[in-house]
Image (cartoon, rainbow, N blue to C red):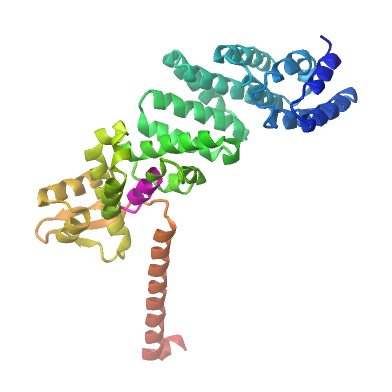
Amino acid sequence: MESKGQLEEAIASAPSADVANKLRELKELHEKRLWHNVTLKLVEIVEVPEMRGSPGLIPLYTNFIKSFETKLNQLTLSKILVVISKSFSQDAEAIEFLEAAATRLQAGDHVESYLLVRSVIAQLKLKEKQNLEECKKLLETIQERLEGIAGVDPTVYSNFYRAQAEYFRLRDRIADYYRHALLYLSYTPLESLAEDEKRSFAYNLGIAALVGEETYNFGDLLAHPIVESLQGTEKEWLAHLLRAFNQGDIAGYEGLIARYGLQLEKEPLLVSKTDLLKEKISILCLMEMVFDRQSVDRHIPFRAIAESTKLPAEMDLELLVMKALSLKLIKGYIDQVEQQVVVTWVQPRVLGLEQIGKMKDRLDEWSKKVHSTLVFMEQGTPDLFS
């Protein structure tokens, strides 16, 4: 079928008048050989909601776009091809389609475009849980190539980190999954994700943050609007739980356990990590205690820690502090003689609005003290300031 014939057929079978008009505009631009404008119009068409995933995109590419694809911006073309690949009913067909595209892009030395397509291929293979070792090698190859390129398009990083995150999730490497999933979100416009996709991603990230043995900073996740996708859903409890952990709020944590007990019992990973969760929120409570104190007032009595963390015995308290020290979340030492913990440093965290408010209050207090000292010195020793 000739290109014009295919386009006429696409116009006739368009799912809406808007799409039909865009296809007519595409036809005019193609006839005038305005390739830049053709590229932009193609992006418009494939991004229309009615067209995403539409089987009609496949013949549109095969019988029309393919005849002039070398004249288009290759990075934009690769993004169009990724959208078209979602129109195949079988992932194996989509992989075959993208593998052919990757071969052409590599031959033309279009590195960014090639790496974008290969990253999407990795995602599809991981979706089918195909040979994980093969996927690992593919992702390592992509990473090596990316490290040698400056100014890479965000879409390339977005798809690469999504594939990396999914690989680590399948490998049960929770900390690596959490880190790469956050990197994926940092390169991905939230509006590009479907609502169910947002909720699924927010849920997986939230669970990873809670059960990850090395994760004690929830601020990056809570600062991202994707968490709001849990509001008003049956998983809303997870957002509340993340906020309680971020603030080291043990009372709030216990209240949520009581309120959402039935929902939590349906989450086997959380149930199996009950002891870890208790230890983690106790450490975060200790960190919050340190943060709330002035830097000159960080000699914290055992009694105060025990009251805040609700730990039953002194031995448990010391083990908790030792764990926080070993994780390098705080620096300092245990003073057995004075029955206190002396903290010289606490790990910086992304702060919530409430925590920023506390810091503002301390800065205001410090500023008043500095001003009072200055006034005292000016009045007591005027010669020094004359």
Give the residue drawn at x 48%, y 21%: 140
**On screen, 368 above or below 320?**
below
Give the residue drawn at x 40%, y 77%: 368
From the viewer's side, name the closer residue of 165 and 6: 6
Q: Is residue 8 visible?
A: yes
From the viewer's side, name the closer residue of 232 and 367: 232
Give the residue drawn at x 45%, y 19%: 136
Q: Position of residue 232 (x, y in %)?
A: 46, 45
Q: Position of residue 145 (x, y in %)?
A: 56, 24
Look at the image and say whether residue 178 sits in the magenta stretch. Answer: no
Q: Is residue 33 left or right of residue 96?
A: right
Q: Position of residue 106 (x, y in %)?
A: 65, 16
Q: Predominant secondary structure in magenta?
A: helix
From the viewer's side, name the closer residue of 236 and 338: 236
Q: Position of residue 205 (x, y in %)?
A: 42, 37
Question: Where the N terminus falls, by quadrant?
Answer: top right
**On screen, 347 above or below 364?**
above
**On screen, 169 above or below 332?**
above
- Place residue 237 in its image quadrant: top left
Q: Identify the residue at the far left of this view.
A: 337
**On screen, 14 above or below 349?**
above
Q: Identify the residue at the far top of this view.
A: 1
Look at the image and say whether residue 242 sits in the magenta stretch. Answer: yes
Q: Which residues are magenta?
A: 238-248
Give the residue drawn at x 53%, y 19%: 124
